[in-house]
Amino acid sequence: MVSPERREEGPDATMQLKALGSFKAEETVQLRVPPQPTAGTENERSEASEASGISGISGTEGESSSAEASSPEAPSAGRIRGDGKTGRSARSRNRNPRKAPRPSLRSRIAADPRLASLLGVLAVQAARLAPYARRAKPEYPRPGRTGWRRWLPSWRQWLGGTAAGFGLSGFLLVVAYAATDIPDDLNSYATQQDNVYFWADGTPMARTGWVQRQEMPLRDIPEDVRWAVLAAENENFYNDPGISVMGITRAVLRTFGQGDTQGGSTITQQYVKNAYLNQDQTVRRKFTEAMIALKLDNRMSKEEILESYLNTSWFGRGTYGIQRAAQAYYGKDVSELDASEAAFLASLLKGAGLYDPTLSGANRDRAEERWAWTLDRMVDIGKLSRAERATYKKFPEPLKSNPLYSTGEQSDYLVELASQYAKKSGAISDKEFDLGGYQIYTTFDKEREKRLTDVVTKARKKALKDDPKTARTVHYGAASVAADGRILAVHGGPDHRKQGYNESNATTVPAGTAFTPFVYAAGLQHGVRTTRDGGTTPVTGESLYDGDDDVPVRTPEGPYWDRSGRKVAASNDGDESYGQISLRRAMALSANTPFMQLGMDTGLDKVRATAVASGLLPSSIGARVPALSMGSSTPSAIRMAGGYATFAADGEHTEPYSVRRITRNGARIPLDLPEPRRAVRADVAQEVTSALEDCFREAHPDGAPDGAEVAGKPGTTEKDTASWYVGTYEAVSTAVVVYRIDLAESLEPLPLKGIAGTAGDSVPYGIWSGALGLPG
């Protein structure tokens, strides 16, 4: 930088420049010096001022100096460079010549007559609106207010903002209404196919009308039925515009508060959701539903909307529409329903899974409460007299099962098993499955199923002939499971229409001594420990145990005492005693006492773990007491067959399954099929299978062709409540159990009273051998 110093010594004053210490050679300083006032006229002084410019200092190197322009004879007086050189070439000074100033906007508008005229009109209007604009414009902080009130808008501003908000919302709703179209096509279930089930060979097995729907004109639906539905769902149906503003508001608030939409739908909105949209619980779907409902209410009459709603709503049990619902729950047409029955069916519209009383006790309580409330609402809106309401005091119990579903054939039990498995492994909801259109390819073998059904039917008829009273409560559970987990055949019961209880899948009776192969496998797998501090001793088929009858069960500390203070002892069938006997020989002769002691020596926890790993459900395993080894567990016939199949598969277990493939409209549905997993070592499984082959040959020397690999074992229970035969032939394990239960009373097993035959003429073995095509 340069510090100027002025000396005033007359009119020819000079200026000395002194460089500061911080001045750099690269910097340029421009100095404009106005001339001193001189004698002369006012005009002369003005001209001189204009010629000399305005004094100032610039640190930029490209500015032109008015002093240079006015004094060309002294170029060095106008600009000084830090390097001591003064002046600048003419070329450098003229690089950016000054341009003429651009006319202002006002000047350009004034030059155009049309723009000037328009500006004049706008100016007049602005002048008129100016007072209102000034009053509406918020002044912050507001004058005349103190504290926090200075920042609050005035009532006019609140009113204006609210009005603007309503106006904008109304405008957007009008645009949305105009932009929303009613879909041309109904949802797919309106033309839905039945679900079709196929045998393992690909031939059709059953065709079920899960989507059972029959159109009924509104004139054929009684007034009581219509008003029961309206009272429960939308009593103002005939007066509303198709939507409920309050209901939608509640639904939206719940959506933002809880994350899902709830309630708030009119009959018209519900029909739109059922017929045109999906079941997604989102605000967007709710808004679209409301717009379509408004349009539909203007296009269709209320009677048409109500008729369509009653014919498309889901009532559970695979039914759509009020006609099929009346048939499914009461076995009658809708025209035959009374107000009480109609009130119950109306409750199902809230969710059949929550209000079908046959599903659970809690469901029944909810259904009865909703039924009573609906009847009371019909009275309140004047559609049911108090006198008639007083006659409906007892809840109208629906049928236990849908009569439209059952055909009475054995395949109904197969369909039941397959549908349950398909929904679980295919992740298909009940409602989606009820919409139908699925092709379910099962694992059931048509020929095996026929043989099993025929032989059980024959045994049932013989029992009814020999002992009708006892046979009335007898049940025959049977199932065949392949080594890879495929369920090939089951016998569920005599008639699905009369007995929905599936005898092959019931966990109601103990396994008895048919459980001992799992105890044997646990001992072979883990070894035994006979002293508390001693090590584990390996077990083989030649290991010896006491086979006498009524041998006390021992622990490392001594005899095992039950809670009543008595010693626990094992018993053999027929009170036989075998002395010291090898485990393999004990299995062949069905001697029980060695396996009760083996279970104690191995550890009941390990016995339990081995049985579960082999395929028995944990919920069916008995308590960890000595009786566990004698079959206190209650597995189903399917699970027992699956457990023995584990031994046939060299110790690898695959969960039993009944569906191998599912398609829908040509597209394959992903299935979570079970994978094999190791349950016991291969050598353990082979030893158990070999012992079971000895057991079969010992009891039935002529029961199979020479060289055939057949393994099997009978099972008896302590209280004679069940009789089993479980065995394997050609890599397929089959379990048969005969037991008595009076389903009208309880699920408590009853004594067989000889209905299952004798050891030499066992009914379970006869069914087992007949189902496998072996000699009886």
Image (spheres, grey):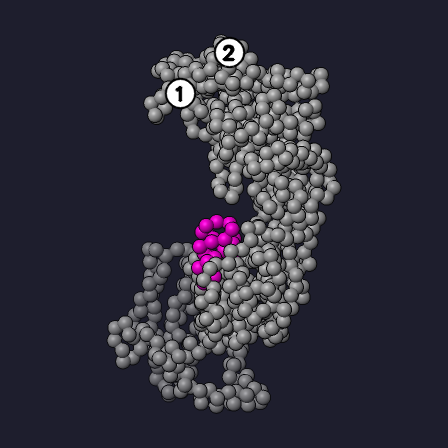
- Quarter of the image for the N terminus: give it: bottom left
- Eyeballing the image, is 397 above or below 577? below
Circle 1 sits in a helix, a strand or a loop, which is it? loop
Specify which label sits upstream in the sequence, 1 or 2.
1
Q: Position of residue 243 (x, y in %)?
A: 52, 71
Q: Which mark is residue 578?
A: 2
Q: Which mark is residue 568?
A: 1
In the picture, the quarter occupied by the C terminus is: top right
Q: Position of residue 360 (x, y in %)?
A: 48, 49
Q: Amino acid at mark 2?
A: Tyr
Q: Can you tell which mark lies on residue 298?
A: none
Q: Secondary structure at mark 2?
A: loop
| Residue shown at the point (57%, 50%) measured from the top left | 401
> Measuring 41% from the left and 25% from the top, which residue is drawn there?
625
Residue drawn at 54 percent across, 18 percent down:
590
Q: Say whether residue 653 is visible.
A: no
Residue 388 x %, y %: 48, 69
Residue 356 is a magenta residue? yes
Q: Does the magenta run of residues contain 392? A: no
Relative placement, left or right, of 489 versus 541 is right
Taking depth in this image into account, of 291 and 171 the one nearest to the observer is: 291
Q: Is residue 196 left or right of residue 721?
A: right
The span shown in magenta is: 350-372
In the rendering, at what x and y percent does residue 283 appear? 51, 62
Neighbour tally class for label 2: few under 14, some 14-19, many 20 plus, Cα within 10 Å: some
